[in-house]
Amino acid sequence: MDPNDALSLSNSYVQKCGLLNNVVALSNLQYRMVLDFTERVEKIRMGRHPSKPVIDVPNYIQHHLSEAITAKHIADHLFLSRPHLSTKFKAEAGMNLSDFIVQEKIREAKRLLRYSDKTSYAIASFLGFASQSHFSLVFKKHTGKTPNEHRELHSRSSKIKPRYRRRIEAPFLSHDPKGSSRVRRSSLLLIRRHRRFCDL
């Protein structure tokens, strides 16, 4: 993983961590952080011994997600011919480059639908789709669900039972020193884990 990207991502999670004040929120952030880092590293480490161009492809896509990316755009950026890059990518990654571009956009769309309040229209526009209807069509083709169905599914699954939520948040509502210490310890642990990921 590019060191600058890792450091930037780590710092963004450290800042988010500083805004939280309960264990449940910290646990959710930790899960999102680990998932985010591992998915990004997985995209880069495709194949047993990927060549530099193949490693550069997902890095390029990550930095241009909001654009209408094509295989030719990536090939031009890497100073390669489109056929050569497409053939090399298919041989090492096991899938067509054009399919991989769409896959990465859909992966990012799923993340935004789950962890942000952006509308489907805003996400479609951000990811460079021609229209919201085109985005919905592509999204359903790859996931079997519409963007709204995907968001609703994860919204239901992430809800915590009211009784459990009250038990977890009680120390913070009553300013229990033990509860505050627990948050501080969790925050420090999360920050240390962020720093370790920067070495990837």
Image: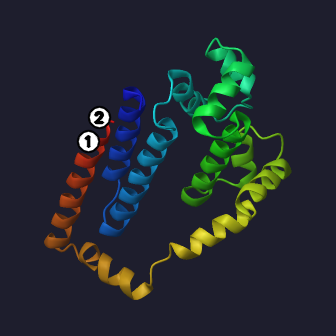
Q: Quadrant of residue 9?
A: top left
13 on left or right of 81: left
Query: Residue 79's quadrant in the figure?
Result: top right
Tag 1 near tag 2, CB within 8 Å: yes
Residue 84, percent from left and from top: 69, 19
How many residues crowd mark 2 within 10 Å: few (<14), some (14–19), many (20+)? few
Q: Image point 84% across, 48% down: which residue? A: 134
Colour mapping: rainbow
At mark 1, the secondary structure is helix
Indicate the secondary structure of the residue bearing disc 2.
loop
Give the distance between the C-alpha atoms of the residues marked 1 and 2, in whole angstroms. Answer: 6 Å
Percent position (x, y) of residue 55?
Answer: 51, 28
Instruction: Say which quadrant the N terminus sits in.
Output: top left
Q: How many marks?
A: 2
Q: Could you tell me residue 44's position as x and y percent?
A: 49, 35
Residue at the image point whose x is 20% and y is 52% from the top: 188
Q: Amino acid at mark 1?
A: Arg
Q: Tell me: 106 left or right of 14.
A: right
* Residue at numbered disc 2: 199
Quarter where residue 151 is shown: bottom right
Q: Residue at x 62, y 40 (%)?
A: 94
Local crowd at mark 1 within 10 Å, few (<14), some, or many (≥20)? few
Q: Quadrant of the C terminus?
A: top left
Q: Could you tell me the amino acid type at mark 2? A: Asp
**Residue placed farthest to the top in the image?**
79
Residue in the image at 18% along x and 59% along y: 185
**In the image, is residue 177 above or below residue 8?**
below
Residue 125 at what x, y percent from top left? 74, 42
Which is more toward the observer, 21 or 140? 140
Q: Which residue is mark 1?
A: 196
Pick the front one: 162 or 130: 130
In the image, taking residue 191 as reference, residue 62 lies left or right, namely right
